[in-house]
Amino acid sequence: MNFVTDLDVKGKLVFLRVDFNVPLDDKGQIRDDNRIRASLPTINWLLEHGARVVIASHMGRPKGKFEPSMSLKPAAKRLAELIPNKVLMAPDVVGDEVERLKKGLAGGEALLLENVRFYKEEEKNDPAFARRLAEGIDIFVNDAFGSSHRAHASVVGIADFVPVKAAGYLMKKEVDYLKKAVHTPVKPYVAILGGAKVSDKIEIIESLLGKADHILIGGAMAYTFLKAQGLGVGKSLVEDDQIEVALSILDKARTQNVSFHLPQDHLLAKAPQAGAETKIVESLPFPDDMMGVDIGPKTVAAYAAVIAMARTIFWNGPMGIFEIDEFAKGTIGLAKAVAASGAVSIVGGGDSAAAVKKAGVRDKISHISTGGGASLEYVAYETLPGITALEK
Ligand code: AMP
């Protein structure tokens, strides 16, 4: 994979895919511009070296229609505040006016295209649309790690129509860290998986069965595994259609050289709400009117002991409904254990990153990935469609 700084970009028309999918408030103001700031090293490098930079991103899920509330205009305004260079906002993604603006760009100037998902062809990875995106483009740079698990036209398809391709700074940083964890993890390698759904994480769990030394399971996902073992889990969130899958994972774990850990105790609540009646239990079945909302203190201690021995840690997904402070102890406890471990630690996903922040240990984590889904898929498949496209 080329890195952008390997290239001569002076005067070249560069198509830069970034992730400017920033959260907006109800007045359309940017609430958090971290994603824009995260792209600045690549944008600045390109502009300082005289490239004519066409920037593309998605925003939200407009489902193939022009949706003014998902326009990238606020992002263009913020980018213009953050860099000294001229930043133009295109009225569209493709078309005559956009082509005119692209041709008129001088070295050191940037043009932000409208939301690529205003066209349904983007998510379909439509070759004709990808060709239009590539019109006049000399170099394709992908710095949108968090979108690179999606085979979309501005991430994957465009690469077929541009002669020179490279990764940006953010992409390279992500891949460098994840590669270390995935291809050559220093052992013991401990994977921590939580969150709501088993169905989202089956492939990652299966791939980790052959790689990790320990897999620690928490979050609602744990209850699907417990129910699969015939245990009553009360009102806990369970994916009944994943029971068979959970059983097969438990079976495979027995034959692989991996310790597969499920919680030993649980914080139960009458409802997933602050102030609800709670209790800690060690044995199952749970009472019919209660649900598991966090791992219990015994589990935190047991998981922390495994984490303390780890040399590599990959974590995705909270151990409970951590958005509610009373149900966040398990997740915070593990965040602190990961921070104290001294292992190479990689945390992926918005929720896990938020949990690490909530625990106040953000600066003790080796790498917080900007892409939840992308980091999971990278760990499972050792590559992503957006990375393969750059290597073609
Ligand atoms: P995911 O996107 O799959 O990583 O799931 C994250 C979400 O899982 C968070 O919003 C958590 O509140 C939720 N979650 C974690 N544990 C539980 C639980 N025991 N019951 C219900 N939701 C949970």
Image (cartoon, rainbow, N blue to C red):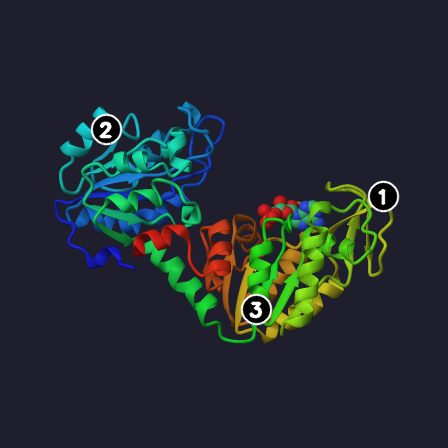
Ligand 1 is within 8 Å of the C-beta of the residue at disc 3: no
Looking at the image, which is closer to me, 252 or 6? 252
User: Element at badge 1?
Assistant: loop
In this view, 184 is above or below 282: below
Q: Nearer the viewer, mark 1 or mark 2?
A: 2
In this view, 37 is above or below 285: above
Give me the disc on residue 210. 3
What amino acid is at disc 3? Gly
What amino acid is at disc 1? Asp
Q: Nearer the viewer, mark 2 or mark 3?
A: 3
Give x and y (percent) for residue 121: 38, 32
User: Is residue 217 found left or right of 135 in the rendered image?
Assistant: right
User: Element at badge 2?
Assistant: helix
Quadrant of the drawing holding the N terminus:
bottom left
Across the whole image, how many numbered discs are drawn on residues?
3
Q: Earlier in the sequence, mark 2 or mark 3?
A: 2
Look at mark 1 in the image and give the residue it sits on. 289
In this view, 106 is above or below 145: above
Look at mark 2 in the image and give the residue it sits on. 98
The image quadrant that residue 86 belongs to is top left
Give x and y (percent) for residue 313: 54, 67
- Alpha-carbon distance for marks 1 and 3? 38 Å
- Alpha-carbon distance for marks 2 and 3? 49 Å
Q: Residue at x 72, y 64 (%)?
A: 299
What amino acid is at disc 2? Val
Q: Earlier in the sequence, mark 1 or mark 2?
A: 2
Residue 244 visible in image? yes
